[in-house]
Amino acid sequence: MSPERALPSFRLHPDPVATGAIEPDADAVCECCGEQTGWNHTAPVYRVGESPEFLCPWCIASGRAARELEVSFATYTVTNEPIPPESLDELSYRTPCFSSWQDPMWMTHCGDAAAFLGEVGWDTLQSLPDAQQSLLDYGLPAEELPHLVKYGWIAALLFRCLTCGTHVAYYDMG
């Protein structure tokens, strides 16, 4: 592990350590580059056949893992608006995904992929009326909003538009 080496940045997933998509792992050896970086991607990896167990954030950020291991990470399943091909490529091949009970979905806004901020509960959502409206639009009954709990049986997955700053969210049930 090289503590002075900064983690790569991900435009569409700005803090993958806070969301749990990338975790410290002193013993992990990346199955792509063969290095022991001290970090491992713990979120879903999509591949025909067995998925790699250990991938470092640098191989994800550079696209090397996608190219050499024929894997993809985040999936774009929200079809409320198309996103540019370059964003879809970044999302699929150079952005860590996140774990969820259902298949992870990536929210969009202003014609592009939004940045994933993490799983949140009502305590966070109370100050985000735009995210609340997004959840209602997604089909969550208004009386359920106060029951959303981070890492609970029902939680919100929060995103922020990179163009206008609007928060969008959907809910996930365990």
Image (spheres, rainbow, N blue to C red):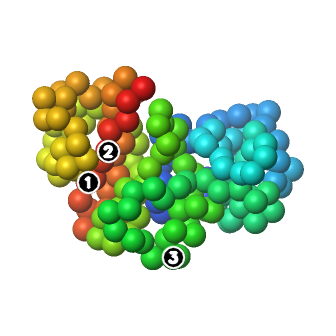
Residue 169 vertical position relative to residue 155 in the rendered view, above or below: below
Residue 129 vertical position relative to residue 65 in the rendered view, above or below: above
The local crowd at label 3, few if under 14, some if 14 to 19, many if 20 or more residues have their Cα within 10 Å, is: few
- Look at 36% across and 42% down and name the residue there: 157
Instruction: Please identify, in this view, whether the residue under mark 2 or under mark 1 is nearer the observer.
Output: 2
Residue at numbered disc 3? 85
Disc 3 and disc 1 in contact, CB within 8 angstroms: no
* Mark sitting earlier along the chain (2/3): 3
Quarter of the image for the C terminus: give it. Answer: top left
SS category of the residue bearing label 3: helix
| CA distance for labels 2 and 1 | 11 Å
The three-letter amino acid code for the residue at tag 2 is: Tyr
SS category of the residue bearing label 1: strand
User: Measured from the top left, where is residue 1 in percent x and y?
Assistant: 76, 42
| CA distance for labels 3 and 1 | 22 Å
- Look at 29% across and 70% down and name the residue there: 110
The three-letter amino acid code for the residue at tag 3 is: Pro
- Look at 58% across and 61% down and name the residue there: 92
* Mark sitting earlier along the chain (3/1): 3
Residue at numbered disc 1? 167
- Residue 22 figure quarter: top right
| CA distance for labels 2 and 3 | 23 Å
The residue most toward the right is: 34
Q: Nearer the viewer, residue 3 or 62?
A: 62
The three-letter amino acid code for the residue at tag 1 is: His
Residue at numbered disc 2? 170
- Residue 64 figure quarter: bottom right
